[in-house]
């Protein structure tokens, strides 16, 4: 019998790496769209940098925080949406 310890490390690591990759890709797509809009309307590139740093990075972290910090077993169950730290059922 072969025991892989820890038992789920490879799939979990793959999921974490994929999520990080997806987050970077999402931010790059958003930055490109914001930069295009800014260029069309004469908005300074520094404004795009500010929006990315102040809002988009935080929004992506907020979106993925629970998923990244919750055990996989809890994610797989019918979970509640977390709003301001309080669980809230889907149908409320």
Image (cartoon, helix red, strand yellow):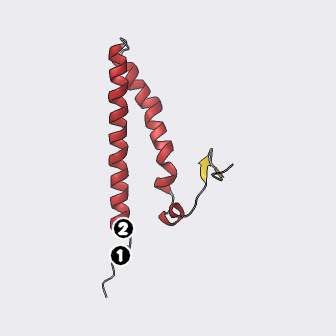
Q: How many marks?
A: 2
**Mark 1 touches mark 2? (CB < 8 Å):** yes
Viewer-proximal residue, 62 or 91? 91
Q: Secondary structure at mark 1?
A: loop
- In the depicted structure, whether residue 28 falls above or below residue 87: above
**Residue depicted at 32% across the width and 35% down the height:** 28
Q: Position of residue 22 (x, y in %)?
A: 35, 46
Q: Position of residue 71 (x, y in %)?
A: 50, 63
**Residue depicted at 34% across the width and 34% down the height:** 29
Place residue 6 in its image quadrant: bottom left
Disc 1/disc 2 C-alpha distance (Å): 8 Å
Farthest bottom residue in view: 1
- In the depicted structure, whether residue 87 falls above or below residue 10: above
Q: Position of residue 18 (x, y in %)?
A: 33, 53
Q: Position of residue 82 (x, y in %)?
A: 60, 49
Task: Judge from the rendering whether residue 66 lies leftward or rightward of residue 23; answer left or right.
Answer: right
Task: Judge from the rendering whether residue 14 lies leftward or rightward of residue 55; answer left or right.
Answer: left
**Residue depicted at 51% across the width and 43% down the height:** 62
Around disc 2, counting alpha carbons within 10 Å, would you say few (fewer than 14), some (14 to 19), or many (20 or more)?
A: few
**Residue beneath label 1, please?**
5
Quadrant of the rendering where the N terminus is positioned:
bottom left
Viewer-proximal residue, 50 or 39? 39
**Residue beneath label 2, please?**
9
- In the depicted structure, whether residue 79 falls above or below residue 32: below
Task: Judge from the rendering whether residue 76 lies leftward or rightward of residue 52; answer left or right.
Answer: right
Farthest front residue in view: 91
Farthest right residue in view: 92
Q: Secondary structure at mark 2?
A: helix
Farthest top residue in view: 42
Around disc 1, counting alpha carbons within 10 Å, would you say few (fewer than 14), some (14 to 19), or many (20 or more)?
A: few
Q: Give the number of the disc on residue 46.
A: none
């Amino acid at each position: 019998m072969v025991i892989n310890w820890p038992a789920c490390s490879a799939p979990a690591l793959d999921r974490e790496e994929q999520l990080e990759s997806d987050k970077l890709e999402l931010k790059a797509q958003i930055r490109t769209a914001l930069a295009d809009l800014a260029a069309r309307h004469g908005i300074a590139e520094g404004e795009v940098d500010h929006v990315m740093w102040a809002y988009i990075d935080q929004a992506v972290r907020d979106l993925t925080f629970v998923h990244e910090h919750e055990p996989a077993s809890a994610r797989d169950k019918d979970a509640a949406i977390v709003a301001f730290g309080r669980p809230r059922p889907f149908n409320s």
